[in-house]
Amino acid sequence: MISIEKSSQTKIDKTDFDNLTFGQVFTDHMMISDFKDGEWHEPVIKPYGPLSIDPSARVFHYGQAVFEGMKAYKDKDEKIWMFRPEQNFERINASSKRLAIPEFPKDFFFNGLETLLKLEKDWIKQGFGNSLYIRPFVIATEAGVSASPAKEYKFMIICSPAQSYYSGEVRVKFSDKFSRAADGGVGFAKAAGNYGAQFYPTNLAKEEGYQQIVWTDANSHEYLEEAGTMNIFFRIGDKLITAPISDRILDGVTRKSVIALAERMNIPMEVRKVTVQEILEAADSGNLKEMFGSGTATVINPITGFGNKGKNYDLPKLEDSYAHAFKDTLMKIQYNEAEDPFGWRYEVKE
Amino acid sequence: MISIEKSSQTKIDKTDFDNLTFGQVFTDHMMISDFKDGEWHEPVIKPYGPLSIDPSARVFHYGQAVFEGMKAYKDKDEKIWMFRPEQNFERINASSKRLAIPEFPKDFFFNGLETLLKLEKDWIKQGFGNSLYIRPFVIATEAGVSASPAKEYKFMIICSPAQSYYSGEVRVKFSDKFSRAADGGVGFAKAAGNYGAQFYPTNLAKEEGYQQIVWTDANSHEYLEEAGTMNIFFRIGDKLITAPISDRILDGVTRKSVIALAERMNIPMEVRKVTVQEILEAADSGNLKEMFGSGTATVINPITGFGNKGKNYDLPKLEDSYAHAFKDTLMKIQYNEAEDPFGWRYEVKE
Ligand SMILES: Cc1ncc(COP(=O)(O)O)c(C=O)c1O
Ligand SMILES: Cc1ncc(COP(=O)(O)O)c(C=O)c1O
């Protein structure tokens, strides 16, 4: 049994659920488990509030920290669903391993998560597109500035209500100078440091009129890999292509779901290296039909154009895009409005 | 004038200055400056103690954090000295820029630092090898889990008394699989995430009997670059070689000081790419005389042997090593026991 310390008041009445900025409002409670004396301790649920951490804690100095991103949905019968949460559980432990953080026990993860979600169920609003964004994360809290793995950590889960949002026109820049990850590095992990490292190049891209960067391989900048928080798909003619995962690329849950759906929907799908060159040629010949990103936050994010070495390309506006079909199919599965042939849905039972 | 809130008690009497573990004990005070409303605010000095930070702060999730490492020394006349501190000031701002963190004003840095050092001067012990290790760092404190630069930060300085230590035999492993930094990445910055990313490969190397890894380039693993917190020098015959800095390699203050000293001491010095191949050949032919690391924490760290793809090599034990000569010369300059032809010493005046 997970101990729950209830918040004496709720912020829910003060929250405008029709005007949510992503990741700004948090629910009333949070889950915490401490790693101490060589083991993870039973999670506890407490009122959401600030942490008291020594200024010499490893997380501040050495970025020993990983995270996950997942969502909970409420269907028309008030049932609460998650989407493939065991994937996120496995991935946070894969990330932890690479960052020399002790892996978290499966029962603590699911018990803690589900207890928290049931406590916060009023924060999950019905309606296609509404969700509760869930952020599990681990930070190294041990005091001391020596560059070695900590012996104390906190595994936490915080939650933030989210709306479906129209992200506007998304134009991306193919990176030709900066890079996100090295072979043999931590790109495949949701390591905190991977994200802060992208802010500066992304700011420069924004100044040039792009919203995001599509990262290329650091060696040659010839292969298109992924975006900041999305995997990337390309449609040439009727064929869909995406890069294979590697130690540089995050193994996205949405990405692997799109790949599985493509097969089911009889969409020709190739998982292989994608060259900048072939995308430019396809764009020039009119064969590049679509580009879209996949990720938990936006599900599927259509890309309207891209820039490469100062030259800009527009993508056609399609009536019957793959992006739309995948988004619709995935969301209907997530919101329990369609059959779930893959068993992806996970009910958070009372 | 920097406001000082004095600690009501001191830990100094409880501190065993003859048995210090690096980075474990901190002095009584810390410096803090907040970035808010678009600007850095005048630093304040407060009793050392925990920070209260929202669990959604950017530093926990996106590793938006950088740091520095420097030292203060006390000479025989009780004067306090630093070593090239303007280099660390410039470097933390270069690191900040790459991490999309606003640069810190020079007068805040030096006023805050010197006020803190004068307040903590009893923590700086006389004696060759004793020092106060100084850790300036910046963390993104703004609440909110959206992957974009924060609008609020803390710039802090904390201090930890340090002894000279004999680090024992240091055997290093040449990395042939993992890597530390990508071209176009953040390797040149003292970004927090660069360090946590090294813990796991370093643990594996430790299991194989090495203390540290010498990182090679991520593309080919053919070029030797730097170690976890040290730049690396190789001596072949009488010639000293070290890799040039790049966007993957930290521009070490000790490294550039060794390069300058080598010229003055008429030691032939080459700053150029160093191949694993040439080091193996030099080791086989008996021409590889020395390897050593350079960094603020240990000054010069002689390396006793190395491993490459499972094969181990020992380095000779020299009577008159370059490592010893550089360490002695550098430390005498640092402790005001020798002439300072380069103007590297910086006095913290009462
Ligand atoms: C770097 C990166 N790529 C891709 C994704 C998409 O992964 P998922 O579909 O599991 O959310 C994410 C975010 O979650 C990410 O951080
Ligand atoms: C990655 C890395 N290389 C080299 C160094 C050595 O630099 P410096 O001589 O300025 O201390 C450090 C540490 O300070 C470091 O973190």
Image (spheres, coloured by chain):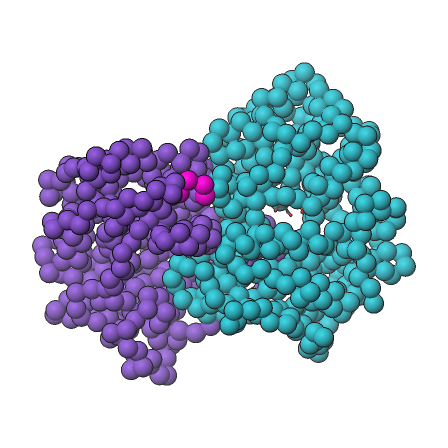
Chain colours: A purple, B cyan
Quarter of the image for residue A256 reads top left
Horizontal and vertical percent position of residue A58: 55, 57
Is residue B118 positioned above or below B212 on the image? Answer: below
Q: Is residue B182 left or right of residue B279?
A: left
Q: Residue at x 61, y 62 (%)?
A: B104
Q: Is residue A231 left or right of residue B55?
A: left
Q: Is residue B253 left or right of residue B177?
A: right
Magenta: main secondary structure equals loop
Horizontal and vertical percent position of residue B157: 65, 63
Horizontal and vertical percent position of residue A324: 16, 52
Residue occupying the far right of the picture = B77
Q: Residue at x 47, y 53 (%)?
A: A200
Q: In this view of the protein, which residue sits in the foreground, B2 or A188?
A: B2
Residue occupying the far top of the picture = B285
Q: Residue at x 81, y 30 (%)?
A: B266
Q: What span is in magenta?
A: A174-178
Q: Quadrant of the C terminus of chain B?
A: bottom right
Q: Is residue B115 magenta?
A: no
Q: Quadrant of the N terminus of chain B?
A: bottom right
Quarter of the image for residue A123 reads bottom left
Q: Residue at x 61, y 64 (%)?
A: B156
Q: Can see residue B221?
A: yes
